[in-house]
């Protein structure tokens, strides 16, 4: 027994000394660097017309969590690079023609995956009855666009003004005015950047306004104390003028009174008449209460002027004043209610209506006030659970069209369009709940009774989209 134990001990000692040190060291843990890879890129034509093709693709990811940008090629020619969106429209194409479109996803280190698609535009004889057009454009990557106002051309195109904010709050020239033009199919034609530097404009201005002049050949933009005249054919800046000497800090409402006259309401409650050609002041009507500012302006067939003013800390907080064509006050109408925005509508019988929404946007409550020519209140209504930031206009059927955004709990927000008769009785309503969370910042009507929707998507922690969105609805307003 003792002999067996001694033999076992001998074997253990022999095994221990037979192990080499370098073989033990060679089995140390090693870090294996995983090769960087990108997920696949799927590419499809999401929409097509006679002169455009829209392509979309799924987001591509890097297993090293690196940022991905996209480059788009048309027939092997690079069209755009450094996109951070997943949809792009190729415009100004020829009808019925085949195109080769390639999208490449790249990291900053040059790792790439790509996909090619061959597709065609619609032929000239293709039927497009009730076709829905959806156009999404990335104007500036990594910048925020705040759409402010628009004007519709007689041919169905539109001119817009927006505020463009680049990253870097403490750097100079990070805020600009952005003016852009689209045709009646939503095709992007041109854009013009106007620097805030040297124009006394900063990101604290509440909004900007735009009107058309000279048979739609010119657009006039008002921002802060400045007015800018721009050629609508190519975006050339024709004239800029500072109106600060008139005593205003900011233009808050505008109206085309005639082909030669533009009416301007200010943050001090003043009303100005400008010559549309050289933007000189023709007359000025001062408001004795400088704590008011203009909300809306309109003109009747006899050239009488109506302007709505919101008061700060005053009761009643809103007044509608009637002026003659030289700015002399004829009478004043008072309205109780806290309104941030509103529209003045004048019907064919010269009745005046003021339509607005409550300052607390989450109530989505509309207010309607109707007055006769003498200024007597003839009707007053509240419409609960409608839209906030409401704007209104009369369509060619003398219906009142009200549009705005509807707010719910948390980030739930979407656009809505309501149709009323002239006595504000509801005829129809439509809410665009199928679109991602969005604000409806503008709406115009077409001859076929369809609408042009202009929206901006609401930003969330997981979704970013700073693009300009245009949607043409079907004739019944549906998408």
Image (cartoon, helix red, strand yellow):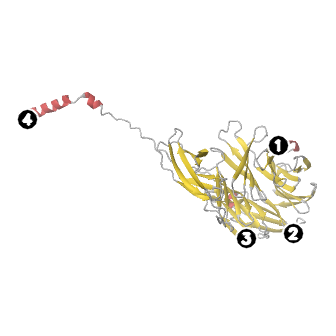
Secondary structure of residue under mark 2: loop
Q: Earlier in the sequence, mark 4 or mark 3?
A: 4
To which residue does mark 2 refer? 349
Dot in front, 1 or 2: 1
Q: Earlier in the sequence, mark 1 or mark 3?
A: 1
Secondary structure of residue under mark 1: strand
Q: Earlier in the sequence, mark 4 or mark 2?
A: 4
To which residue does mark 3 refer? 426
Q: Residues within 10 Å of mark 2 (few under 14, many from 20)?
A: few
Q: Quadrant of the C terminus?
A: bottom right
148 relative to 251 in the view: left or right: left
Q: Position of residue 166 (x, y in %)?
A: 67, 42
Q: CA distance from mark 4 to mark 2?
A: 123 Å
Q: Position of residue 360 (x, y in %)?
A: 71, 57
To which residue does mark 4 refer? 4
Looking at the image, which is closer to me, 411 or 303?
303
Tell me, for residue 186, which label it has, or none: none
Q: Earlier in the sequence, mark 4 or mark 1?
A: 4
Residue visible at 82% across and 66% down in the picture: 370
């Amino acid at each position: 027994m003792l002999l067996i134990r001694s033999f076992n001990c001998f074997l253990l000692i022999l095994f221990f000394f037979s192990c080499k040190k370098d073989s033990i060291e060679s089995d140390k843990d090693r870090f294996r660097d995983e090769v960087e890879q990108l997920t696949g890129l799927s590419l499809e034509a999401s929409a097509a017309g006679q002169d455009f093709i829209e392509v979309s693709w799924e987001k591509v990811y890097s297993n090293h969590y690196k940022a991905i940008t996209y480059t788009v090629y048309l027939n092997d020619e690079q069209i755009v690079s450094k996109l951070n969106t997943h949809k792009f429209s190729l415009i100004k194409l020829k009808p019925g023609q085949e195109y080769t479109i390639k999208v490449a996803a790249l990291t900053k280190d040059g790792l790439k995956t790509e996909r090619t698609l061959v597709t065609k535009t619609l032929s000239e004889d293709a039927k497009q009855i009730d076709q829905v057009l959806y156009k999404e454009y990335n104007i500036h990557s990594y910048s925020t666009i705040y759409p402010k106002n628009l004007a519709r051309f007689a041919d169905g195109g539109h001119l817009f003004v927006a505020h463009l904010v680049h990253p870097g709050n403490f750097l100079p020239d990070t805020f600009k005015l952005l003016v852009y033009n689209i045709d009646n199919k939503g095709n992007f034609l041109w854009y013009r950047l106007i620097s805030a530097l040297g124009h006394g404009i900063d990101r604290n201005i509440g909004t900007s306004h735009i009107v058309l002049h000279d048979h739609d050949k010119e657009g006039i933009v008002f921002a802060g104390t400045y007015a800018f005249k721009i050629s609508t054919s190519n975006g050339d800046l024709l004239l800029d003028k500072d109106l600060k000497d008139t005593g205003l800090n900011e233009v808050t409402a505008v109206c085309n009174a005639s082909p030669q006259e533009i009416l301007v309401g200010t943050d001090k409650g003043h009303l100005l008449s400008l010559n549309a050609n050289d933007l000189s002041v023709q007359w000025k009507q001062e408001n004795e209460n400088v704590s008011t500012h203009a909300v809306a302006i309109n003109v009747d067939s006899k050239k009488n002027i109506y302007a709505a003013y919101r008061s700060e800390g005053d009761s009643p907080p809103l007044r509608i004043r009637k002026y003659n064509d030289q700015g002399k006050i004829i009478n004043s109408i008072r309205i109780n209610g806290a309104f941030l925005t509103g529209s003045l509508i004048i019907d064919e019988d010269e009745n005046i209506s003021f339509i607005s929404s409550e300052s607390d946007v989450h109530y989505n409550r509309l207010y309607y006030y109707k007055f006769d020519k003498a200024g007597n209140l003839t009707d007053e209504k509240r419409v609960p659970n409608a839209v906030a930031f409401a704007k209104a206009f009369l369509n060619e059927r003398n219906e009142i069209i009200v549009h705005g955004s509807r707010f719910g709990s948390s980030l739930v927000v979407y656009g809505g369009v309501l149709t009323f008769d002239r006595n504000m009785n509801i005829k129809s309503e439509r809410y665009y709940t199928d679109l991602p969370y969005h604000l409806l910042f503008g709406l115009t009507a077409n001859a076929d009774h369809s609408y042009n929707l202009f929206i901006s998507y609401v930003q969330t922690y997981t979704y970013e989209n700073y693009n300009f969105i245009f949607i043409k609805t079907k004739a019944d307003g549906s998408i």
